[in-house]
Image (cartoon, coloured by chain):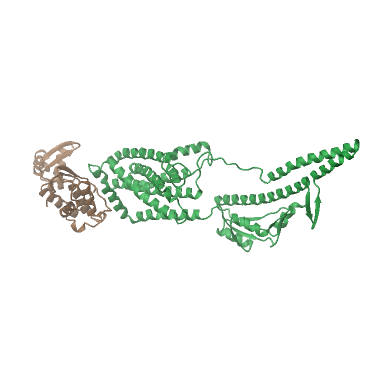
Amino acid sequence: MRWLLLKDLQILRRSPLQAVLLVAYPILIALLVGLAISRDSDKPRVAFLNEVPPGSRVSVGEAELPAVEVDERICRRVECVHVESRAEAAEKVRDGDVLAGLILPADLVDQINSLSTPRPGSPQVEVIVNEEDPVKAQLVNDRITSLLAQANLLIAKRIATEGGKFLDLVVNGGDFEILGQTIEILGLQASAQILETLRPALPAGQLRDELDRVVQFTDLSRSNLDVGGVLLSRLSQPIAVDKQVVSGASPPLELFAIAVAATLTLTFVVVLLVAGSLALEREENAFARLTRGLVSRSGLLTEKIGLGLAVGAVVTLLMLGGLEIFVSLAWERFGLWLAAIFAGGAALGAAGAALGAAAREVRAVSLLAFMVSLPIAFLSLIPSGAVSGGLYDAIGVVTALFPFKPTLRAMTAGLDSGGGIGGPLLHLAALTAAYALFARFALRRFTAA
Amino acid sequence: MSLPNGGGSVGWVPQQAALYRRLTVEENLLLFARLEGHEDPHASVEEMLALTGLGERRAEIVARLSGGNQQRVNIAIGLLSQPVVLLLDEPSVGLDPRQRARLWEFISGLAGGGATVIFSTHDIQEAERYGERLLVLADGEALFDGSPSGLREVVRREAPEAADQDFETAFVAFLHHRGH
């Protein structure tokens, strides 16, 4: 069998385009994934123009937000590309340099400040977007909505805080500064105490009854306004999130991206190589000669799967090594990576052998391998909830029949400590056996054809 | 020219060259020598290269060889099993006359070296020229078993009008007379 393996490697070496693709493919994937995950995906590039005059302050009660703080707050959430004019912002959006343009108009602070006056204005920011691409348009829309929600939330919190302070002043009393002068506010609590003190001095009668009503009112007001303070603080964020994870300990996004890249690489290299090299045996008319006593059919299948596994493992590890440039991987989990790569590679190799035995011609088999692997890979990446329940179940059945998804699960578990690797490995072992049996059966047609 | 001894099996050489066109002549022979379990596969390769006369082209990729030379390598691979009997399935199909002549010279050399060579062909002139014993099969029926001259005698008896024609015409007349 080792001589057949050596022969296949010699043939591979003689096919420069194939060999270059096998090396170039993982490098390309590693670069693309590396560049994608090394950029903070939460910070889209936005052309930013702040026309608000320097020194303008957003006032909410006693609190003031300096203008520079608004800049900082925005640029913490997006990658700000500062521009000089609205036209420049529009040009950058049109050219695709930035995802969107954000313009804070000169009167923005005045408009915000007017909210606490009898004639409130309507503060607006200007957003420039290029919606030629619906996906990009949706992304920009989501980002802007999120940014505005955060800005509104910030202002609401400030208003709630200041409102709470006023309530506290009314209830408990204290000093209040206005126009440079300090005014003492007595407060409901102190008022009630004073009234309680005065009550015995009044004779029983109408006057005392009226006083009792005032005392009762201050008590009632104090109690209710205490609750009002709590309600006001809740107003800024009435619904809090309490996330309960029921399944699938989610790995960090960058590790999942790496697992997807590694699984894609392994899939295409192994499936194409095994299917192609098996079909080549028939195209070269060597299959009949080999299986007339030189090699058993099962031996030939094992050799092909071994070839795919060996080359796929090397290429995938090269790709993971390349990704180390961009992101730090947990090399102490190397053994688990290998387990995932070998189990996935074996199942993918068996699937490739089944395809190769079924299609029998190298060109047809290459096309078939792409036509099967690519949609399965896409289907495997659809998360639950993205489609209807019935369709998701159907997709789950289809993707469970091909080794891509269990390989992805094993790879993710190998790279991250969040999930168990045992289940995916067992799944892959079952798929390896099933596809190997199918391939062995299909090889009976190989000679006859 | 001699055949490797010690075999005893029947060597089979398929009609289409069953070898790896992206490997060299030497790599193909070495692979099959190893798969056949030869103790000294390199020595067997040297022997086959000498037998086929392709020693100087040993490092050439098979795909670049002529059809005749590819067929020689194909036959040499069949010989690596050290067979007592070598079966050739239409060995000259698709070859031009010059390549065919060289191939038959090679096959005749094998037979001259002691091998029993059985070949199938649809070219009756080739059968007359190179075969010592002919077995005529038509629709699964064995119509004749004997020498080419013996076939001529049968034609003379059964289809005398074609007896003095060329061998192919006489053969067709024989088949017609036998109902095929």
Picture quadrant where residue A406 is located: top left
Q: Is residue A375 left or right of residue B174?
A: right
Residue A47 x %, y %: 60, 59
Q: Which chain is green?
A: A
| Residue at image point 62% right, 59% down | A48
Q: Colour of chain B?
A: brown
Q: With respect to residue A212, does A269 lie above or below?
A: below
Residue B179 x %, y %: 17, 36
Residue A31 x %, y %: 45, 56
| Residue at image point 77% right, 46% down | A172
Mark yes or no: residue A184 visible. Answer: yes
Q: Is residue B79 left or right of residue B157?
A: right
Q: With respect to residue A181, does A385 lie above or below?
A: above
Mark yes or no: residue A120 visible. Answer: no
Numbered disc total: 0
Which residue is farthest bottom?
A84
| Residue at image point 33% right, 38% down | A437
Q: Nearer the viewer, residue B48 or A226?
A: A226
Residue B133 x %, y %: 11, 43
Quadrant holding the C terminus of chain A? top left
Q: Is residue B25 left or right of residue A83?
A: left
